[in-house]
Image (cartoon, helix red, strand yellow):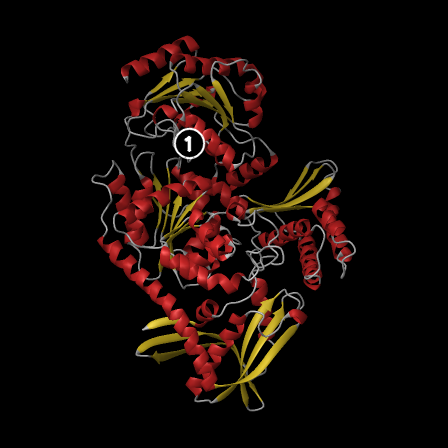
Amino acid sequence: MKEIAVRELAYFSDSSGDLSVEFFSNRDENLGKMAHEYHQGQYLENDKAEVYIKYELDILGEKYLLHGFIDGVLKRHGKTIIEEIKSTTSDLDLINVDFHKEHLAQAKIYAYLYMLINNLEYIDVRLTYISIVDYDTKSFDMNLKKDELEDYVFKLIDDYVSFLNLVDESKKNRKKTIEEIEFPFSSKRIGQLELMKAVYQALSENDILYTIAPTGIGKTMATIFPALKTLKDNDKLFYVTAKELGKEAPLKAIRILMDNGLKMKCISITAKRKICNNKMANCNPDECPFAKGYFDRLKDATLDIFSNYDIYDSNTILKVTNKHKICAFEFSLYLSYFCDLVIADYNYVFDPHAHLIRYFDDDTYKPKVLVDEAHNLISRSKEMYSSVISSDDLRVLRSKMNGITPSIRKECNFAIEKVETYRENLKDNAIYVTDVLDLNIDRALRNLIVKVDECLSENKNDKIKDKDVILEVYYKMLDFVRIGEFFGKTHRFIARLDNDNIYIEYFCMDASKLILDTINTSIHGIVFFSATLYPIKYHMDLITHGEGKYLELESPFDPNNLDIIINNKISTKYKNREYTIDDIIEYIEALVESKEGNYIVFFPSYQYLNMVKEKIIDPDYELIIQENKMSDNDKNIIMEKFKNTTNKKVGLFVSGGSFSEGIDLIGDALSGVIIVSVSLPMICDENDILKDYFEEEYQKGFDYAYTYPGFTKVIQAVGRVIRDVNDKGIAILIDERFTYSLYKRLYPPHWKNIKIINNTYDIKKEIKDFYRKNM
C-alpha cells in the first residue's frame, strides 16, 4: 500500500501560477502559521481545527492511503464546511478561485475523503485566503457532489502515481544497491577503515562524532560510504560544506560509487547568485520568465529530471530548468525532497532561517549529517545567529518609500529615533555593549516591518522605483527581529558609531547550544570531520557545547616528506611588521633559488600582504596576488596558473582565505609555503567581547578568542603542501611565538620533522639537503 500526503498530491498534480519569491523564500513561516492560528481562533464552539484524516482508496486493485490535516471542519446551520486556509501577502482583490489551483485541489481532496468517511453525497467547501499583513480574508464557497469529486481526485492520483512509481522504483534501487555495493577501491588507506567503522556506528546510534582526519586518509569516501550503509526508508543523508569548492569531493565520490553499481538520487544545492537562470535580475514574475508560470511547468520539469538523471549538479539543473523555463534555485530546493543525498552549504542544516524546513522542522524525514571542514562551523554558526542594522539603512528606506501610500514615514521615524538614542552612549566611546535586549527597538522595527508589508502589498502591481534597495533593507529588518528571538546569555547587544552612522547589532558569541538543540531535535546522527580540529575540546565546546565523542587518526603520509623550518627570532606582531618585510622577501628568494617550483606565502591580513608586495621589485618569478573579494572565476584562474609548472610562481595569499583550505595542488603544482605569523585574529572590540565571554564560560578567554582560531589557519595553510603520498615539500613558519610551549602543544602529531633555523644561508642549505635526500 502506498501512502500519499494530501498536500503533496495536490501540489504535484494540480500546481499553477507564478513563483513569487519577493517574500516567501526569505520570510519566516511563523507569520503564516500565526495568520492560520488567528483565523482558527475565530471558530465557533462546534468547529474543529487541524483535523487529521486518512482513508484507504482502492483504485484498479492498488491500495492508496491518503492522509493529512484539514485546516477546519465547520458546523454551520446543520451543514458541514471543509475549510482550507492559505496565508498570503498578495492583494486579496486580485485573488480568484484559480489563483493557485493546488490550494483548491487540497480542499477538494480533503472534502472527498471526509464524504467517504461520513457517507455524504454533497458537501460545502471553503477556500480562504488570509493576509498576513492585516489578517483580512477572502473566501470562495462551493457545494460539491461526491461523484464529481471522485472523478477529480482519481485523475489527480493517476497523474501522481506515475511519478510515485518512479520514486518507489528509485527507493527500491537505493535500498538494493546500498546493500550490495562494496567499497570501490581494492585496498583501504591507513586510518580509512577505522574512520568508516566510527562513522557507521555514530550514524546508526544517532550519535555525535568528531573525527580529526588528516589529509590523505580519503575522508570523503570513508564518511559517505558507511553513511549510505546506515540509511533506512525515511532517512536522508546531508553532506554539508563551508565553501562551494568543498562540494566537488562528495560529488566525485558519488560518481565513483555509481560507476560501481550504486543507484540513488543526489543533488548539490548551489547558491542562488551562482545558479540563477536570469543573472540575478528581479525575481518578480512580471520581469523574470523563469518565475512566470513556474508552478504550471514544475511537474513536467520534475518528471524530466527524475526520469533521465541521477546526479543533479548545477550543470544538470541549469540544463533542465532552461529547457522548461523555471527557476533553477527554487527547483533545486523542491527537487531535494526526492533525493537521497543532499550536498549543500552549512546554512541549509544549521541556519535558523535558511535551513530546509521540511527536513528539520517536522518528522517526515530523518536527516543524518556529515559536516566537512567542521572547524569552519564555529565562525559560521556565530554569523548565522548575529544580525546588524544601521540608522542609515532606515533613512534609505524612508527616502526610497517617500510618496508611496500608505506612508511608512511615521513608523520609520520612530524606529530611527529609537536607534538614535544610542548617540548619547557613543559620545565618548566608539562602542556600547550590553547583555540586555532593547525591546523598544525590537517593537519599533516590528511595527515598521508590518507597515512596509502593507505598503508593498497594496502597491504590488505598481512598479516601485529602487524596489531592490527597499527589499534589501526590509530583509535586514526581518533578519534583525528574528535573531532577537534567540537573544540570551550567548548574545550581546552592541551599538557603534561610524562616520556619524549608528550601527546596532545582535552579536552571537557562542552558537553551540543552538546547534546542539538542532541536533537533538532534528538530526539522527552527525559526524564532524576535519584535519584541523585542534584542540579537540575547543571545537567540541564551540560546536556542540562539549557533547559528543571524538576519534583522532594518524596521517597516512611519511612525516619526513614535509620539512618544517621555524624562524623564531622574527616578531611579526603588528608594531614590528614594517621591520620584517625585507626578511620575508629574503625567505621567498631563498625558497625559489633553492628549488624551482611554485610557492605560496600566507599572511595574517591583506594589509601585511600589500606591505610586502610593494617592496618586491622585478622578481625573477611570476607573482600572483590574492585580492580581497575575488570572483569564483578569478580564483579558478589562479588555480590553473599553479597547475602550470613551466615557470616559477609565488602566490601572496591570506591565511584562512579561499586558498588556505579545500584546494589540492599535487606534486610540482606546489613545492612549499611560508606562513607569516601565528595568524591571530585582529585585536578588536568584538574579539575582546568574545575573550571576556570565553573566560567566564570556559576559563580560556584569550585562547578561545585568539590563539586557537589563529593556529587553525596555520595548520590549514601547512596542509596545502602534502596532498599525496608522493608529495614532498617545505613549510617555513616565521614568528617567534611558534616555539612557545603554548603553540608547541598545538602541533599536529605528524609535524615531526621540525628544525629551528634563523638565517637564509642555512635555510638554503637545509632545503637543498632535503630534496637531495628525497629525490
Specify whether residue 729 is in view: yes
Kindly identify the residue that appears in the image at 32 percent across and 55 percent down. 264
Task: Count neighbours of disc 1 (C-alpha within 10 A) and say few if under 14, some if 14 to 19, many if 20 or more.
Answer: some
Looking at this view, is 601 or 746 the one in front? 601
**x, y percentage for residue 562?**
33, 23
Looking at this view, is 504 or 411 the one in front? 411
Q: Quadrant of the C terminus?
A: top left
Q: Is residue 237 left or right of residue 426?
A: left
**x, y percentage for residue 137?**
64, 73
Kindly identify the residue that appears in the image at 43 percent across and 18 percent down. 648
* Residue bearing the label numbered 1: 716
Looking at this view, is 454 or 288 the one in front? 288
**x, y percentage for residue 625?**
52, 25
Q: Amino acid at mark 1?
A: Gln
The extreme left residue here reads 186
Please tell me whether residue 57 is drawn above or below residue 634 in the rendered image. Answer: below
Specify whether residue 580 is in view: no
Q: Is residue 763 left or right of residue 232?
A: right
Kindly identify the residue that appears in the image at 39 percent across and 73 percent down. 158
Image quarter of residue 124: bottom right
Q: Quadrant of the N terminus?
A: bottom left
**x, y percentage for residue 149?**
47, 82
The mark total stands at 1
Image quarter of residue 93: bottom right
Q: Secondary structure at mark 1?
A: helix
The extreme bottom residue here reads 78
